[in-house]
Image (cartoon, coloured by chain):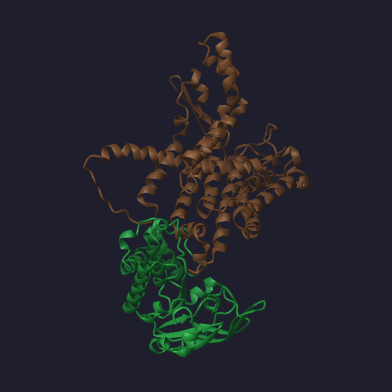
Chain colours: A green, B brown
Amino acid sequence: MGILEVKDVNKRFGGLKALTDVNLSVTENTVHAIIGPNGAGKSTLLNCLVGKLIPDTGSVMFDGHSVLGRKPFEINQMGISRVFQTPEIFGDLTVMENMMIPLFARRDGAYRLHAFRSVASEAELRERAEAMLEDVNMLDKRNMHSASMSRGDKRRLEMAMCLVQEPRLLLLDEPTAGMARADTNNTIDLLKEIKAKRDITMAIIEHDMHVVFSLADRITVLAQGTPLVEDVPENIKGHPKVQEAYLGEHA
Amino acid sequence: MFGLGKKDVTLFLIVAVMALFAPFILNPFPTDSGLAQFNAGYPDLMQRFVIFGILAIGFNILFGLTGYLSFGHAAFLGVGSYAAVWMFKLLSMNVLPAIVLSMVVSGLFAVVIGYVSLRRSGIYFSILTLAFAQMSYNLAYSVLTPVTNGETGLQITLDDPRVLGQSATADGGIPVTNLFGLEMRSFETLDIGPWAFQFSVGYYVAAVIMLISFYLAIRIFRSPFGMTLRAIRSNQNRLYYTGLNARPYTLAAFVISGMYAGLAGGLLACMDPLAGAERMQWTASGEVVLMTILGGAGTLIGPVLGAGFIKYFENIFSKINDQVVHGWVSFLPDGLEDFVVALIHPFVGKGWHLTLGLMFMLIVIFLPGGLVEGGQRIARRLRRRPAEEPAKSASTEPAE
């Protein structure tokens, strides 16, 4: 039984069937990649997991609880953190402040932030934030205004913001989309580092299958809204169905 | 100290000293000198400085932190005033219950307006708050006449019940507002040489309340709540995916800010116990926006400076009439004198709005961070000169 169980999920937008009978199971402490060509329904699936969309039929269970009908912040409080395609950070805040907000959210819950206790007095949370920044090699940038950083650093910061919450499941939405080759490799290295340093469950949505081969423990190939195959990376590469789905791109 | 960081303690002490010694600081010119008209150290104006300072501090908690631009804050000011005057009419002339009621009523008012208006953001939010404020103004002006006394304004009279006080004083006059017997309007004059300094009870009551408000605002700015409010302005989407619901926090900021405005309105009524609908007009809402932007939105001290700046212009600049200008340029030959006076005329006296408007434009264009940014630039320039010498103190500042 996986930590995330997607059962018979269907979603249509008017006449378009975006997802058809999607079944997916993500096991704890594995990296599970969901790949597929453009229009395969990857983003729709992800949005069903984080509370942005509600499937027409089917169920999405996280750790035995349904996430359907819950709002994004409630799903985050259940233990799912999300990294966006383009880094979403608090641009007006410093790097350190960006790190403190997820920590407050985790410790105090969605509704119970302190209005009079000083942020400066939170030594313990500050240490955790610094340790996390150290982990992603950003400690020296902690007082920087986060909007002025490079895209690669923003990606690192966003990742650190998600990881510092110690999520039970980390969702990544095309973390290398639109990146130059060098940035893509950096991101892959960062993810590998993260995976090596801690027990973590990750689900990565990715268009480019080469990105995930060295990273994923299991790969699900999605095409036209439905899973084609699910297997370990070695078996995916030469699979005839996958070749067919990606025909013209990597064939 | 007091749960504040070192920098904030310094800032607070500066404001405290300025507020407590305002009767001296604002009265730099001897009473019978020609410049005496630029003195702002009389009780009525000093009270306005601190009361509108409170209004701007509260407005800044909403606008400066969350970025939600309310264009209807005058409604809370007016509601606070009406609540306070009703307290004077029904309960007693003590200002304490009046202040408490004005905060409670404006807080409730803010919950309702905020709950509806915060469903939208940006320009739509501003328009919604503006619509609410105009509705309140028109209600106060005509429909709710039994409560607000319409265009005459709500005043205290000799036949008010005042169950805990007296309807009329022993000699048949209307009692005055007081704090446990200390009359708001009473003042002492201290003569030192040619100077006359006035210390009014009303001013000091308002100043102490302003300092408390300022202290609370610092605490809010430095708290996780305040940081989250800035995060709301920055990226609401990220906030929702970080496990926080932006809605209740924004509403809390709106209500706090509305209560600050209600407090300011209540204090205005304490100093002069009448309340009129014009206090709720949209120009009054616009004024607090100007104060905050002029001083520096999102900074702690900015709104207070902005409030002082605008109130000074309104009360001092508007008093410079053609005669005064003639006095200044009397050394010029006659024809030239008239010409110069005609030139200056549109900018002073009744034309003070023109000067204020020009100053506002200059500040917004050249100092988008308001007066505070101007101060920072000057400080940086002054510091750079000694810093060019080897003194290179690479102090690691703690992140906030």
Q: Quadrant of residue A29?
A: bottom left
Give the residue at x 57% y 39%.
Answer: B181
- List x then y, in percent, for residue B49: 53, 37
Q: Quadrant of residue A155?
A: bottom left
The answer to whether one can see residue B205 in this image is: no
Residue B372 placement, left or right of B356: left
Give the residue at x 56% y 51%.
Answer: B257
Give the residue at x 59% y 54%.
Answer: B122
Q: Does B52 appear above or below A119? A: above
- The residue positioned farthest toward the left in the image shown: B390
Q: Nearer the viewer, residue A218 or A107?
A: A218
Give the residue at x 34% y 38%.
Answer: B381
Q: Nearer the viewer, residue B117 or B340?
A: B340
Q: Does A101 appear above or below B284? A: below
- List x then y, in percent, for residue B110: 63, 54
Tag count: 0
- List x then y, in percent, for residue B307: 53, 39
The answer to whether one can see residue A12 in this image is: yes
Q: Does B346 appear above or below A193? A: above
Q: Nearer the viewer, residue B150 or B359?
A: B359
Q: Nearer the viewer, residue B260 or B236?
A: B236
- List x then y, in percent, for residue B329: 52, 14
Residue A140 placement, left or right of A47: left
Q: Quadrant of the C terminus of chain B?
A: bottom left
